[in-house]
C-alpha cells in the first residue's frame, strides 16, 4: 500500500481554504472496513485538462460525438486509463472499456462509468465528472492495492448526447436503421463509429445479455437545480425519465412575401410558431414533472422575402411515466391538426429517438443511501429528467445513479458548473458504492 | 426592313391553336404609326433556355446572385444581346448594359430591362420575363430597322433578389458597409460583384444623376393573384411598396431540456414563436395592403434536447406608405418587449435592408395606359407589393412598370408561372411604350 499520508496531504493542500474536508471513501464492511483515500485534486485536475479538447472561446465545450475533438478527448481519457492500470479496449460500437480483475473470476462484473462527448456549445461537467471519477476510483484502488471480489469494468460510452448510441448497442436496443442517422459531427453513426475506432459492421456483437452485469453505477451532475436549491450533497436517482423525440415537418405554400396578401398565405412558419407555443401550453396544462421542448427549427427556403413553404422542427417529451408521454403526444397531434386547419398547412411526424423510462434498482439505491449516510453527506431521492447511459444498462442488471449538484441547475450550456468539493463527494460515494456492491 | 410576313408567320405557327392572336406592337404616332412585329415565340424559347441555368430537379430554379449558375445565365443573356445587336458591357457593379444609338444623340436614354438572378428555390419568370423581353424588343427593332430618337439602353441588373444591389449602385443608394453583407451564394457582395465581372472597389463610379435617364420601363410578372383573378391582361403599376428588413436576435438562456422545469425556462424559441404569431396579428390588425413576414429562423444551439438560448430570425414589412411601415414596426417592438418579459428573454433588431416607397411617373403611366388601350388589352392600375429595380431608377427619372398575370398569384416558388400569351402581350406593351416614350 502506498503512503497514505502523502496522498491525503496533496488533497488537503489542493482544497485548503474551503469548508470541505471529507475526502475519503468509507467501506463499512468486512476486512476493508476503513477509510480509503481518493485523490480528488488529481480528479479535478484531469477534468480541467479534458475540458481543453473542443473548448469554446466563450467558455464551455463543443466536443460532439465522432468529431475531431471527441476523438482527441478519448485519446486523452485512454491515457488516464493506462495510468490507472486499466488497459483500454475500444469495442465495435466505439465504447472504451478498462477492466480490473476480481479475486472471484466467476462473478459478474461491476460496471461503472459515463461519457465524454458533449452537446454543441455544452459544458465541462456533463458526463466527464462520472467518466473521470470512475477512472480515479480505479486508480485509487490500484494505488491502495484494494482487490475486489467482482471484476471491475470502467466504461466510457460513445455518443451519449446523440442518443445513447454506445450503451444502447451494448443493451441490444440499438436498431440497424439508426446507424444511418446523422450525428452532430455531420457524420452518420456508421461513419462516426468507424472514425473513433469502432467497427460498425460488427456493432451487433457488442450486445450483452440481461444478467451479464452484477451492478451498474454511474455518477453524474444533476443538470437541474434541486440539490443546490435544497442545499443537499447527493441525489440518489429513483429512475430515469423516458424520452421521445420526433422530427416535425410542417408543409404550407411557398410564395412571395410582398405580393401575397396576409389572408391568402399558407405560411408554414406561422403554423410552426403556433405549434411551439401550443406544445408549451399542452405540456404545462397538467400537474407533474413532465417537460416538452422544441429545440431545433428551420424554415425553407429561409429567405426574409419568401413566405416559408416548409418548416422542420424537433419535438421532445420526457416523463417517468411512458403513458403520460403518449397522452401528451396525442394531445399535441390533435391541437396541431387544428393549427394546420387555420391556414391550410399540414403536420407530419417522424420518430427520431425513444428511450423507455428506467427505474433504478432498489438494492443499489439502498447501497448508495448507506454509503452516503456513512460518509456524512446529505442526500435525497429524485428522478432524473435527463437521459443517461444508465437507462440502457438497466436492461442488463441492477442499476444505480449518483447525482451531485449543478450550480444554478444549468447544464448543456457553457455556464454548466459543479464545485470541486461536490465532485470529490460524488467520486467518494461512487468508490464506496462500488466497494459495498462488491460485498453484496 | 426585313420580310415581315415570314416573321409574323413564325409567330402564328408557334402559337397555333391558342386563343391569342395579337402579337404586334402598335405605334400610334408619327412615321412609325403602324403595327410592328415582335417575335414572341423566340422570346418564349429564350425564356425556356435560360431556365436551364440552375434548374432544380423538383422544378423552378435556384440561380441566386453571384453563384456559378448566375454567372452562366448571365453569359447566356450576353449572347442573346449580341444576337440582338447590343454589345454587352458589364459595369463595376456587375450590371449588364446593351446600348442602341438614337438619331438624336443629345437626348437622354430610354432604359428598360430587369434581372435574371432568382431567390433560392425560385421560379422561371420573375425578372427573366422583363429581361429577355427587353432584349427581344431591341432585336425586333433591329430586325425591322426601326431607329428611335433617344438612345436605348437594355439593362440586366445584378443581384435584384438580394436587395437591388446593382440598381441601387446606379441610383447612388447603395452604401459602402453593405458590400460586406453575405449574399445567398455565400459570397459577400464585394466578392460576388467581382465574381460576375464587376469591380467592387470602383462600384461608386456607376452612379448616375437624377435627370440622366429620359424614361425607365420595366416589364415584370405581377407575383400576386389580382390580374388573374380579375381576368385582366396588364397591370399598370402605381408605385412600388417600401420594404424594411431586420435581423431579430432573441436571447434567452440555454439549458438542458430534460432537467429544467417548464416554469424555470428562458426559452428563446418560445419567445420567437410568440413573436412570429404577434407580427402576423399586428400587421393584420389595421386595414390596408401592408404585409409582414418572418421568412428565416434559426435556434441555437439547435439540438432537440437543448432549450434554445438564442434565436435569430428575419422580419420584413412592406407598404406603399413609409409612415405605416414605421408605425407597424413600433407596435411590433412594443409587443415583443412584453413577450420578452413573460419568460426573461430579450429582443434586438439590426436593420438588414430598406427600400423607400417609389411612385411611378404619371406621364409614363399614361403612356402605358395608352399603348395598352391601343393594343386592345384589358388593364388596371395597381401597386407593386414586390420590390423592383424600377424603384431605384425612380430616383433618376420618370419610371413606369408593366405587370402581366402570375397564374395562381404564385411567385418565389417553383410553381411560379405566366402563359406564353401573357408574356407576348407584356413584351408588346413594353415595345410600344418604348416607342411612344421616344416620341414624347
Image (cartoon, coloured by chain):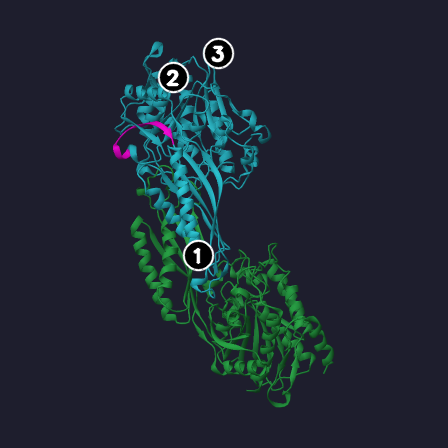
Chain colours: A green, B cyan
> Along the polypeptide, which appears first: circle 3 or circle 1?
3
Residue A340 falls left or right of residue B116: left
Q: Residue at x 37, y 55 (%)?
A: A275
Same chain, marks 3 and 2?
Answer: yes
Q: How many marks?
A: 3
Same chain, marks 1 and 2?
Answer: yes
Q: Secondary structure at mark 1?
A: helix
Q: CA distance from mark 3 to mark 1?
A: 66 Å
Residue B297 lies within the magenta run: no
- Residue holding disc 3: B106
Q: Chain of mark 2?
A: B
Q: Secondary structure at mark 3?
A: loop
- Residue holding disc 2: B437
Residue A211 falls left or right of residue A273: right
**In the image, farthest residue toward the top:** B31
Residue span colored magenta: B228-240
Circle 3 or circle 1, nearest the eye? 1
Q: Nearer the viewer, residue B366 or B134?
A: B366
- Residue holding disc 1: B343
**Circles 3 and 1: CB distance less than 8 Å?**
no
Amino acid at each position: 500500500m502506498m503512503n497514505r499520508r502523502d496522498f491525503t496531504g496533496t488533497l488537503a493542500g489542493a482544497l485548503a481554504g474551503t469548508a470541505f474536508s471529507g475526502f475519503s471513501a468509507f467501506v463499512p464492511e468486512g476486512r476493508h472496513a476503513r477509510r480509503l483515500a481518493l485523490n480528488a485534486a488529481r480528479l479535478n485536475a484531469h477534468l480541467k485538462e479534458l475540458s481543453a479538447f473542443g473548448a469554446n472561446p466563450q467558455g464551455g465545450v463543443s466536443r460532439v460525438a465522432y468529431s475531431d475533438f471527441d476523438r482527441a478527448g478519448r485519446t486523452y481519457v485512454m491515457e488516464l486509463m493506462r495510468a490507472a492500470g486499466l488497459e483500454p479496449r475500444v469495442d465495435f460500437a466505439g465504447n472504451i472499456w478498462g477492466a480490473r480483475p476480481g479475486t472471484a473470476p466467476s462473478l459478474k462484473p461491476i460496471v461503472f462509468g459515463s461519457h465524454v462527448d458533449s452537446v454543441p456549445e455544452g459544458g465541462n461537467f456533463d458526463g466527464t465528472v462520472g467518466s473521470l471519477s470512475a477512472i480515479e476510483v480505479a486508480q485509487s484502488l490500484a494505488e491502495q492495492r484494494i482487490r475486489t471480489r467482482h471484476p471491475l469494468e470502467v466504461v466510457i460510452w460513445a455518443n451519449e448526447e446523440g442518443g445513447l448510441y454506445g450503451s444502447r448497442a451494448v443493451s441490444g436496443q440499438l436498431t440497424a436503421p439508426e446507424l444511418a442517422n446523422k450525428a452532430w459531427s455531420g457524420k452518420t453513426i456508421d461513419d462516426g463509429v468507424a472514425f473513433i475506432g469502432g467497427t460498425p459492421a460488427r456493432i451487433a456483437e457488442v450486445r450483452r445479455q440481461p444478467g451479464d452485469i452484477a451492478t451498474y453505477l454511474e455518477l453524474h451532475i444533476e443538470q437541474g437545480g434541486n440539490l443546490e436549491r435544497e442545499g443537499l450533497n447527493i441525489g440518489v436517482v429513483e429512475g430515469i425519465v423516458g424520452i421521445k423525440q420526433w422530427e416535425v415537418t410542417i408543409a404550407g405554400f411557398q410564395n412571395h412575401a410582398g405580393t401575397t396578401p396576409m389572408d391568402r398565405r399558407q405560411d408554414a412558419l406561422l403554423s410552426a410558431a403556433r405549434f411551439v407555443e401550443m406544445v408549451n401550453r399542452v405540456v404545462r396544462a397538467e400537474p407533474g414533472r413532465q417537460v416538452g421542448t422544441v429545440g431545433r427549427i428551420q424554415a425553407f427556403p429561409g429567405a426574409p422575402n419568401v413566405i416559408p413553404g416548409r418548416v422542420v422542427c424537433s419535438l421532445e417529451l420526457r416523463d417517468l411515466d411512458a403513458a403520460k408521454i403518449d397522452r401528451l403526444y396525442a394531445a399535441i397531434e390533435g391541437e396541431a391538426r387544428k393549427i394546420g386547419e387555420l391556414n391550410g398547412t399540414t403536420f407530419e411526424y417522424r420518430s427520431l429517438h425513444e428511450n423507455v423510462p428506467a427505474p433504478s434498482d432498489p438494492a443499489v439505491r439502498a447501497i448508495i443511501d448507506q454509503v452516503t449516510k456513512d460518509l456524512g453527506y446529505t442526500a435525497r431521492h429524485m428522478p432524473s429528467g435527463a437521459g443517461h447511459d444508465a437507462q440502457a444498462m438497466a436492461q442488463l442488471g441492477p442499476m444505480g445513479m449518483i447525482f451531485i449538484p449543478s450550480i444554478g441547475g444549468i447544464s448543456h450550456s457553457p455556464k454548466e458548473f459543479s464545485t470541486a468539493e461536490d465532485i470529490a463527494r460524488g467520486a467518494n460515494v461512487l468508490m464506496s458504492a462500488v466497494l459495498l456492491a462488491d460485498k453484496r
